[in-house]
Image (spheres, rainbow, N blue to C red):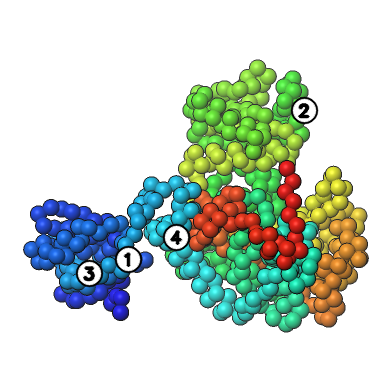
Amino acid sequence: MYRSHTCGELRLADQNKEVILAGWVQKVRKLGGGITFVDLRDRYGITQLAFYKDANADLYEEANKFGREWVLQVTGKVQERSSKNKNIPTGEVELVPTKVTILNTSEVPPFTIEDETDGGDDIRMKYRYLDLRRNPVRNNLELRHRIAFETRNYLDKQNFLEVETPVLIGSTPEGARDFVVPSRMNPGEFYALPQSPQLFKQLLMVSGFDRYFQIVKCFRDEDLRADRQPEFTQIDCEMSYVGQEDVLQTFEGLAKYLFKTVKGIDIANFPRMPYAEAMKYYGSDKPDTRFEMKFVEIKDLTKNKDFVVFDSSEYVGAICAKGCAEYTRKQLDELTNFVKKPQIGAKGLVYVKCEADGSFKSSVDKFYNQDDLSKWAERCGAEKGDLILIICGETEKAQKQLCELRLEVGERLGLRDKNVFSCLWVVDFPLLEKDEELNRYFAKHHPFTSPKEEDLHLLDSDPGAVRASAYDMVINGVEVGGGSVRIHDSALQKRMFSVLGFTEEKAQEQFGFLMNAFKYGAPPHAGLAFGLDRLVSLFAGLDSIRDCIAFPKNNSGRDVMINAPAKLEPEQLDELNIKVEIKE
């Protein structure tokens, strides 16, 4: 037996017990006067080992040679500490060793294994197995386990059945880019790794498994960002004989259950916000509603004043930053430079200060008088001491730029508190979006999303106006889950494929197995998928999903720890009938 107790387990009630601990050396503290303390750490906590020269000179001398991250097994007696540490659960006791076995030595680690480490992202990613020893990272993975466990618990009680679906499937070029896998036994042919189990979960509905879920790995060969990895985990769900409201109630219930059981937080009922409203007031289909600062359109109040920038713009939108009229020129320049970043793309920023004396000071005073600015302030609900910020341009682009500005100002004002959670459903998405260059429509969600029944008559005459029976769960400006009511009628699915520009042959080639299954009595069904990584990162208050994944990839999609992806040996490529040519 390597240990009788963990390093986070001992308390005063264990005083005088002889116990065995095993773990890593966190720190050695040589106090002089014949006393050395060693902090022994495992996954559960830290216990202080007290080596006294007078009690056992040999063990005392040995302890002074221990290095960081050495692996020890220690037998000893628990005693009360004379100097207690209230910051750790074991801080009232220490272990006086009677026997120490060195299970392994360690090289000096490349960074400190502590909560506040001196290791940068790159070095910690390279030595991820060491990074995982740190409390913050380990806590994130324990949180992930708890969320996954409680999800299974909740769904099991709702009669959901966990079913595994294939990982090697066929490619569907209409979605994001696939990761493809060559087949040795079928030369020149390829599997794809699933972007989601979408088709299989719909087939399960046809099969009579009326409530399915799976915590499943998915893969997309897309450019990376803070909330995106090439492989990610979904809580994937589907239900039969339900409509949109049934799905929203069930999975709003799951979210509330997770907040209560994992975070101890009661969450109010989720408001429903139509997509059009989200875009109009927040410029985003995943609005952060922890704070107000809604968009206000003022185009009609800015016309015919010889200010060409506004006159030539399709859209002029404003936000009101409460109490910010005292912003300095430097602060305003910082905001202007922020919106002019290439990734945001605004050409400039107009401001209006609502001064304490009731007057207005603006960057466009040359074109607009006090009466004009007063009307802007009135529409924006701006009061004395407030700051109005304005962006103009093409409607969609300007709204996205104003959205980024709103989030930046909210961050600067401390309005995006990670310990506050604002949840909502965004509903009534457009069914389709048009690519003007290709002059064709693409599915906003996927080609199996059902149009809203009241919009069906527009599907052939005005496809762009058709709304989808689709919904996203948004928490603090993050889309954590999304789904839709599915098309279960073969005739409607054929119409949908036609609108998307599929020939019957192409539709049959890519989705024939699903269409054929629908001939045998497909029930009405709907579902959604949560991003487990995003959900965990929200609960943990992280800015990136990387630290809630055990072995993540970096921003280039590389695993620098195992050096993947990597080139294959020529023999392997020959066996797969693959010839590699790198284009310059």
Q: Which residue is mark 4?
A: 129
Question: In the image, 557: left or right of 38?
Answer: right
Crowd class of label 2 (few under 14; some 14 to 19; many from 20; radius 10 Å): few
Disc 2 or 3, which lies upstream in sequence?
3
Labels 4, 2: front one? 4
Q: Position of residue 295 (x, y in %)?
A: 64, 40
Residue 325 sits above or below residue 128 on the image: above
> What SS does tag 1 mark?
strand
Residue at left offset 58%, top offset 36% = 320
Q: Amino acid at mark 2?
A: Ser
Closer to the N terminus: mark 1 or mark 4? 1
Marks 2 and 1 sit apart, C-alpha to C-alpha, by 72 Å
Residue carrying label 1: 104
First-in-chain label (2 vs 1): 1
Element on which disc 4 rests: helix
Could you tell me how far apart the alpha carbons at marks 3 and 4 are, in whole angstroms? 25 Å
Whether pointer 2 and pointer 3 mark residues with C-beta atoms closer than 8 Å, the reply is no
User: At x 35% / y 56%, what residue is drawn?
Assistant: 107
Q: Is residue 545 visible?
A: no
Which residue is identified by label 3? 100
Badge 1 amino acid: Asn
507 relative to 163, above or below: above
Marks 2 & 1, CB-CB < 8 Å contact: no
| Image quadrant assignment for residue 498 | bottom right
User: In front: 538, or 110?
Assistant: 110
Element on which disc 3 rests: strand
Which residue is tagged 2?
A: 312
Q: What distance separates the C-alpha of mark 1 from that of mark 4?
A: 16 Å
Mark 4 and mark 2 residues within 8 Å of each other at the beta carbon: no
